[in-house]
Image (cartoon, grey):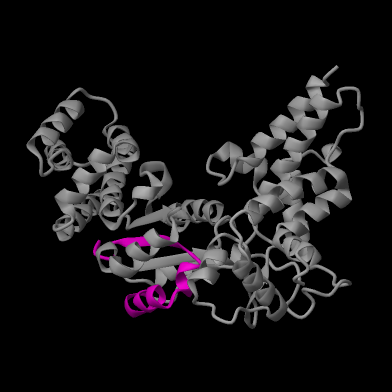
């Protein structure tokens, strides 16, 4: 008979592993593990050292924990007296449709929403004027429909974000309305920020998460071709960007020409460069222990063997998202075993379960690879750097977490531990 209590334990662990980033007070209390404290301090320093209209670019691997860190950073900046507007672009706009126009539009929209939510004293006539502006587009029919929908009442922010998220025609209407009036869009954001600053006596700080999760082509279009538009608002903004994009010469050159040094969140290094491939190398226990804390906050220790938990951590390559992905796959394997072998009393995450989970993830990594990419990965593994770090193929592997970038005294690259297993199976290393 299926052990329903054990099944529910693994289901709960799986659900708890979904809780990234940590945003609510309850999530923080239950699951927080402090890491990358230096990165938060450097971000604070970058913002505070910037002029009132300063912009900060925050880069890192997808899944390295930037979102949780940014949420912590936003809370701390609020405590220091800033009026902080923190949002994920993924929550507001369909990710495949993000562009510089709707980023600026959502900044203005989010500013007005937070001002309303926090009961900032904006005169009613001014608020009506702002809503009138948001509901006026280039097409009379769309304008009329928007004004009618807003006039019905309810949360205007939810109305507009639902349209941005779900309606391609609305996104296109916004693009056509403002693509040649970017300056007007930025001025409207400045106007709202000005009202907030006058009423609260606090400087405005906008923090935009998840821009790093866009496809590389979109990232390059936004940051290479339209960065000047994004930098138009006259208040502080923190933008995110994937690490692969700042290894693109064209994108990096544009960012360096108009902004301060890019702030980087490094991947946790379990091994130093010299020791990384030695069979008897010993990982840095302090880093391993941090990742074990993250794991044990979500999986009770009676559901996972200690040695297996350690192996889960090491197979993550120092990337939080990969730790979560491996652990969730292990939970899936255990729930499968509970259903298929209901009489077993000893089911927990052990090395056999981890082996099955890694096989599934290894095959996910393998599907897009041809021999040219296998050879590029093998070369990078052997030399700890590629022949051409700017090639589209390498940047794609970096973006997809096949390759991980590490930084201490030197910048170097290694291969995701699961992908290393692939290379060994292909007899390439």
Q: Quadrant of residue 30?
A: top right
- Count of numbered labels shown in the rendering: 0
Residue sitting farthest toward the top: 1
**Magenta span includes 258:** yes
In this picture, residue 63 sits left or right of residue 142: right
Q: In this view, does 253 lie above or below 301?
A: below
x then y, percent, for residue 236: 33, 62
x then y, percent, for residue 348: 85, 37
What residue span does the magenta drawing correspond to? 231-259
Q: Quadrant of the C terminus?
A: bottom right
Q: Quadrant of the N terminus?
A: top right
Any part of residue 383 in sight: yes
Q: Work out whether residue 395 or residue 211 is closer to the camera in this orientation and state it.
A: 395
**Magenta span includes 190:** no
Q: Work out whether residue 251 or residue 56 is closer to the camera in this orientation and state it.
A: 251
Q: Residue at x 77, y 37 (%)?
A: 333
In this picture, residue 175 sits left or right of residue 125: right
In this picture, residue 135 sits left or right of residue 338: left
x then y, percent, for residue 134: 18, 41
Any part of residue 88 in sight: no
Q: Which residue is drawn at 79% across and 74% down?
A: 277
In this picture, residue 181 sits left or right of residue 254: left
Q: Is residue 45 above or below residue 132?
A: below
Q: Work out whether residue 168 or residue 37 is closer to the camera in this orientation and state it.
A: 168
Q: Residue at x 23, y 53 (%)?
A: 189
x then y, percent, for residue 212: 46, 58
Q: Work out whether residue 127 or residue 58 is closer to the camera in this orientation and state it.
A: 58
């Amino acid at each position: 008979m299926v052990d329903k209590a054990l099944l529910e334990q693994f289901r709960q662990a799986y659900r708890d592993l979904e809780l990234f980033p940590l945003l609510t007070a309850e999530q923080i209390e239950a699951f927080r593990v402090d890491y990358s404290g230096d990165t938060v301090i450097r971000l604070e320093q970058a913002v505070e050292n910037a002029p009132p209209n300063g912009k900060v670019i925050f880069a890192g691997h997808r899944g390295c924990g930037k979102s949780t860190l940014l949420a912590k950073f936003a809370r701390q900046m609020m405590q220091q007296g800033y009026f902080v507007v923190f949002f994920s672009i993924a929550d507001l706009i369909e990710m495949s449709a993000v562009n510089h126009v709707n980023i600026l539009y959502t900044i203005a929209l989010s500013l007005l929403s937070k001002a309303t939510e926090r009961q900032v004293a904006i005169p009613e006539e001014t608020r009506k004027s702002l809503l009138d502006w948001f509901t006026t587009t280039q097409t009379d029919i769309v304008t009329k429909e928007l004004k009618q929908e807003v006039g019905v009442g309810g949360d205007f922010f939810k109305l507009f974000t639902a349209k941005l998220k779900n309606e391609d025609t609305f996104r296109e209407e916004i693009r056509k309305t403002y693509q040649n009036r970017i300056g007007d869009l930025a001025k409207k954001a400045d106007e709202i920020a000005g009202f907030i600053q006058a009423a609260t006596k606090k400087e405005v700080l906008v923090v935009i998460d998840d821009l790093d999760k866009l496809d590389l082509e979109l990232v390059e279009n936004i940051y290479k071709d339209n960065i000047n538009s994004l930098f138009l608002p006259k208040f502080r903004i923190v933008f995110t960007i994937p690490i692969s994009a700042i290894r693109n010469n064209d994108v990096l050159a544009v960012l360096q020409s108009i902004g301060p040094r890019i702030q980087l969140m490094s991947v946790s290094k379990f091994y130093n460069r010299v020791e990384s491939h030695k069979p008897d190398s010993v990982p840095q226990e302090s880093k391993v222990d941090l990742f074990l804390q993250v794991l044990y906050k979500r999986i009770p220790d009676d559901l996972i063997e200690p040695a297996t938990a350690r192996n889960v951590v090491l197979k993550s390559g120092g990337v939080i998202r990969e730790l979560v992905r491996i652990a969730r796959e292990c939970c899936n394997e255990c729930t499968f075993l509970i259903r298929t072998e209901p009489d077993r009393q000893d089911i927990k995450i052990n090395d056999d379960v981890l082996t099955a989970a890694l096989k599934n993830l290894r095959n996910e990594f393998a599907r897009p690879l041809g021999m040219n990419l296998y050879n590029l990965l093998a070369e990078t593994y052997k030399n700890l750097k590629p022949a051409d770090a700017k090639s589209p193929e390498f940047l794609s592997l970096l973006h997809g977490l096949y390759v991980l970038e590490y930084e201490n005294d030197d910048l170097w690259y290694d291969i995701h531990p699961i992908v290393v297993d692939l290379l060994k199976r292909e007899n390439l290393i």
